[in-house]
Image (cartoon, helix red, strand yellow):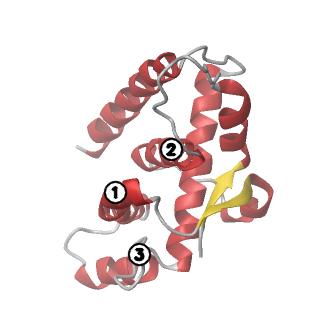
Amino acid sequence: MSFRMPTRGETYASSKLARQTDAPKYIVTDFDIYYAGAVLGLCARQRIPVENYDAEINRELTRTYPKDRLEIADTIAGMLVEAELTRQSIDPGNAKLILATIEEYLSSASQTRLTTAGHKLLDRYAAAGFRLLEERFGDDGFRYEEEFFVAYLGLLDEICSSTNTADS
């Protein structure tokens, strides 16, 4: 299985993020864009419906994490399971359901730490993350990547703060 870029992610990569030739590049690959959407969706615990997968998920991005992003595999896997446990309101004391969720979405044999179902689920979270970006920033583009990061981190902080408060 592979990571697949949401259509909205393609839009951000191609038109919303101006690529200044003389500025330093922080968003080096399309995977960086994908990751930004995935983290937003996971933190918000929002994913697109499974029936929208084919319509909203675009091209194959990569089958593995880029070499310089390998260290995030375990973190993303953990965030994915945590988001699903929360979404499904699984009791933290229900070891059987927790184990079933882990087995459905994670694989220690995979370099990405995800099963095929885990990849598809993460793509759905990424697509929802781009919906959140679109809802917040609309058609506005960013002249510099730094502008995007300031706006993105503000939104991420807001979402994570409200999600953590709601979980308390």
Q: Residue at x 54, y 53 (%)?
A: 125
State whether residue 79 appears in this view: no
- Give, as a three-letter code, the residue at label 3: Gln
Q: In the rendered view of the protein, which quadrant contains the N terminus?
A: bottom right
Q: Residue at x 42, y 80 (%)?
A: 110
Give SS at disc 2: helix
- Give, as a three-letter code, the residue at label 2: Asp
Give SS at disc 1: helix
| Residue 92 % position (x, y) | 22, 68
Residue 31 drawn above or below residue 144 = below
Left or right, residue 59 beside residue 128: right
- Give, as a three-letter code, the residue at label 1: Ile
Give the residue pinned by disc 2.
32
- Work out how far the residue at label 3 is from the one at label 1, CA to CA, in angstroms: 11 Å
Q: Quadrant of residue 111?
A: bottom left
Give the residue pinned by disc 1.
72
Give the label on residue 111, or none.
3
Residue 126 drawn above or below residue 159 = below
Q: Nearer the viewer, residue 57 or 104?
A: 57
Left or right, residue 74 beside residue 151: left
